[in-house]
């Protein structure tokens, strides 16, 4: 059986864009690991401001429940500051992702594309760092599955989601020639919607506003652009470390959990 590794910026990224793919891999008996660069301590809790520690702890519990529904048994956290990934040393981020890839030896990697889906700067920084980390790996390496959205999906769901400021201007980018289009079967769709609901602090307002039918329709399809990253392909990214001097992030300062 293969190994699929999802690499994300925040808890809940995984289920929103690729809950079906991850649950399908788990259902087929693959090892599935999700890596999170932050603990998700920034932002809102049920639409309201929250203390970072309280929110991070709440999101940990929600993530644990959500991943259990998807069948994902392994999760890891790098503890970078939520909302500040573009300011963190790229070398450090790339190095830690690379270390994980060397250890896990995935067959498939799933993450955001360069548009970052919502356009969140953390998502974009993550996407670039994943490609750079993959370019350090021995070849042929894993397949890279980057999340893409169709024009149909954007037209159908983004206006409603943007009632809650889900997307940055101009996002998501659309890509209508994906390599993989996954239409979730009833079992996978039930799992994904339940797993979305488990992230209650981040999703309840959407379920309340638009209802299960909207959420099921939104969750029912996933699209991916698939590629391989050649060794050294992202050399420019590795030689550029312009962010490093802007950040003095101390890993030991990351939130700890009981
Ligand atoms: Zn995110």
Image (cartoon, rainbow, N blue to C red):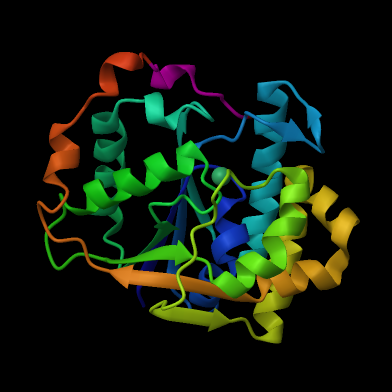
Q: Is residue 37 visible?
A: no
- Residue 92 in which image quadrant: top left
Tell me where residue 102 appears, x and y as whole percent: 22, 52
Q: Quadrant of the N terminus?
A: bottom left
Instruction: Please state which of residues 87 and 71 is positioned toward the viewer in this rendering.
Output: 87
Residue at the image point whose x is 47% and y is 65% from the top: 148
Q: Quadrant of the C terminus?
A: top right
Residue at the image point whose x is 57% and y is 51% from the top: 13
- Residue 90 in which image quadrant: top left
Residue at the image point whose x is 46% and y is 44% from the top: 123
Q: Which residues are magenta?
A: 249-257
Find ligand 1 in the image and state its quadrant: top right
Query: Eyeballing the image, is 148 above or below 116?
Result: below
Q: Magenta segment: does it hold 204?
A: no
- In this rendering, position of residue 122 left or right of residue 192: left
Q: Overall secondary structure of the magenta stretch?
A: loop
Tell me where residue 96 appears, x and y as whole percent: 30, 38
Tell me where residue 67 appears, x and y as whole percent: 62, 58
Q: Residue furthest bottom?
A: 185
- In this rendering, position of residue 208 left or right of residue 239: right
Tell me where residue 201 appears, x and y as whole percent: 77, 42
- In this rendering, position of residue 65 left or right of residue 222: right
Q: Is residue 144 visible?
A: yes
Query: Eyeballing the image, is 69 above or below 48?
Result: below
Instruction: Please state which of residues 119 and 108 is positioned toward the viewer in this rendering.
Output: 119
């Amino acid at each position: 059986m293969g190994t699929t590794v999802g690499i994300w910026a925040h808890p809940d990224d995984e289920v929103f864009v690729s809950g079906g793919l991850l649950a399908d891999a788990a259902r087929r008996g693959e090892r599935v690991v999700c890596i999170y660069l932050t603990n998700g301590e920034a932002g809102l809790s049920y639409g309201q401001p929250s203390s970072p520690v309280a929110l991070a702890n709440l999101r940990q519990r929600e993530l644990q429940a959500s991943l259990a529904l998807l069948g994902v048994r392994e999760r890891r956290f790098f503890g970078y500051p939520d909302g500040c990934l573009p300011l963190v040393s790229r070398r450090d981020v790339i190095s830690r992702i690379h270390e994980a890839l060397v250890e896990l030896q995935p067959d498939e990697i799933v993450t955001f594309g360069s548009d970052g889906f919502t356009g969140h700067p953390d998502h974009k920084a993550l996407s670039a760092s994943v490609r750079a980390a993959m370019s350090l790996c021995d070849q042929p390496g894993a397949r890279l599955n980057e999340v893409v959205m169709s024009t149909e999906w954007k037209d159908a769901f983004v206006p409603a989601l943007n009632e809650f400021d889900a997307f940055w201007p101009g996002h998501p980018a659309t890509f209508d020639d994906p390599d993989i289009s996954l239409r979730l079967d009833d079992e996978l769709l039930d799992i994904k919607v339940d797993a979305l609901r488990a992230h209650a602090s981040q999703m309840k307002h959407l379920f309340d506003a638009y209802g299960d039918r909207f959420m099921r329709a939104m969750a029912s399809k996933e699209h991916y652009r698939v590629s391989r990253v050649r060794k050294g392909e992202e050399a420019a990214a590795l030689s550029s470390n312009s962010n490093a001097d802007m950040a003095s992030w101390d890993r030991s300062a990351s939130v700890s959990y009981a």
